[in-house]
Image (cartoon, rainbow, N blue to C red):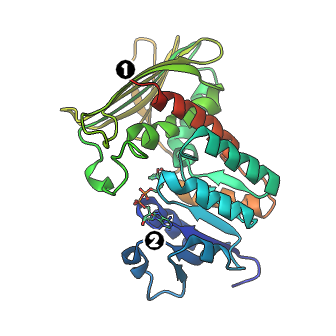
Amino acid sequence: MKANKIGVGVIGAGGVGEKVMEVFSQHPDAEIIGICDTNKKVLSKYFSSKINLYLDYRDLMDHENVDLVYIAVPPKFHYPVTIEALQKNKHVLCEKPLAHSLEEAEKMLMTAQKKGVIHAMNFPTFYRNAYKIMEEIVLSNRLGDIQRIQVRSHFPAWPRDWQQNNWINTRDQGGFIREIMPHYIQIIQHLFGPIQPLQSLVNYPEAAAESETGLMAAGSLKNGTPVVFDGLTGTGEKEIMEFTIYGTTGVVMLKDWNQVYFGEKNQGLIRLDDAAPINHLLDLVDHVLQAIKGNDAKLITFKEGAAIQQVLEELICSRR
Ligand SMILES: NC(=O)c1ccc[n+]([C@@H]2O[C@H](COP(=O)([O-])OP(=O)(O)OC[C@H]3O[C@@H](n4cnc5c(N)ncnc54)[C@H](O)[C@@H]3O)[C@@H](O)[C@H]2O)c1
């Protein structure tokens, strides 16, 4: 390994893990030292590479060249794996949601702060140009007074065809609330501050082990602006992923994560162009690596992650 490269250990090389690992491998300042996955079939994809392969994450963390651990295991395992990495003084990039409970999230934050390592989370939308355009519209006051913030996520089927695994539709750790809503909570709290206590109505199917089918929830910002979450699965429509901020002089909407629409009074919403497309995941990875090198970086830390977890728990914990 070159002395100036940051050694990366990847834990969980499934759907998202593989994608982010690919981006780390493209970055000139990073080197993938090892991959851990409990599924031998997943590891077998890398048999012909020079990367060290592990079935137990503790063994990967013991490798002296691993500086940063990227954790992309299912949500229930974020806590034990992250705590182990922090105890071994590794920097951590963790997938969302941060943890499986607020208590776990707070312990992760405390441990990371105590260890003084870099702690970051993968919220890719935050690094997308579409979000940056939306943020610019909000900050330049083109919306007037904000009247309502609304999230609408409707799925013809959950999980989606491309998202099949053994946990995503379990009530224990899956469901669209845990999987999708953290992205929007992050944006809302980043732009506007904490979401105040929510009233939440969650619908569940008869099968006790299966995840929720519906969500209607409302909270507010500190100044009273309503924040509305609307989620539904199994609907007879095309998937809808919309995040809309309504103001007295304009409306801005983020659609499907990568498209931004804007309209003013008495106008329809018009899609705004992304003049200079970027690889947002590469940007995220670059910020994490810059932070480790001691440079300025834009990170979503475990502090934000724990604040997101609090809202998430309020969304999920309220029962029908
Ligand atoms: N940031 C995003 O936009 C985004 C997108 C999708 C998923 N995610 C999050 O990423 C995480 C992983 O999601 P996914 O869709 O890749 O799931 P996945 O099931 O496809 O992949 C998880 C992998 O972890 C492995 N694994 C499970 N337990 C392990 C352990 N103890 N040690 C090592 N490996 C273990 C599994 O074998 C699997 O290969 C979840 O927390 C999910 O919420 C984030």
Helix or strand or loop: what does disc 2 sit on? loop
Q: Amino acid at mark 1?
A: Gly
Q: Is residue 156 left or right of residue 15?
A: left
130 w.r.t. 283: above or below: above
State which tag comes first along the sequence, 1 or 2.
2
Q: Quadrant of the N terminus?
A: bottom right
Q: CA distance from mark 1 to mark 2?
A: 50 Å
Task: Tell me what residue is drawn at x 45 percent, y 40 percent.
Answer: 178
Q: Quadrant of the C terminus?
A: top left
Q: Badge 1: few (under 14), some or many (20 or more) residues near its Cα, within 10 Å?
A: few
Residue holding disc 1: 268
Most foreground residue, 312 or 183: 312
Q: Examine the image and state in which quarter residue 269 appears.
A: top left
Task: Tell me what residue is drawn at x 61 percent, y 76 percent.
Answer: 60
Q: Position of residue 266 (x, y in %)?
A: 40, 11
Residue holding disc 2: 38
Disc 2 Cβ-to-ligand 1 distance below 8 Å: yes
Helix or strand or loop: what does disc 1 sit on? loop
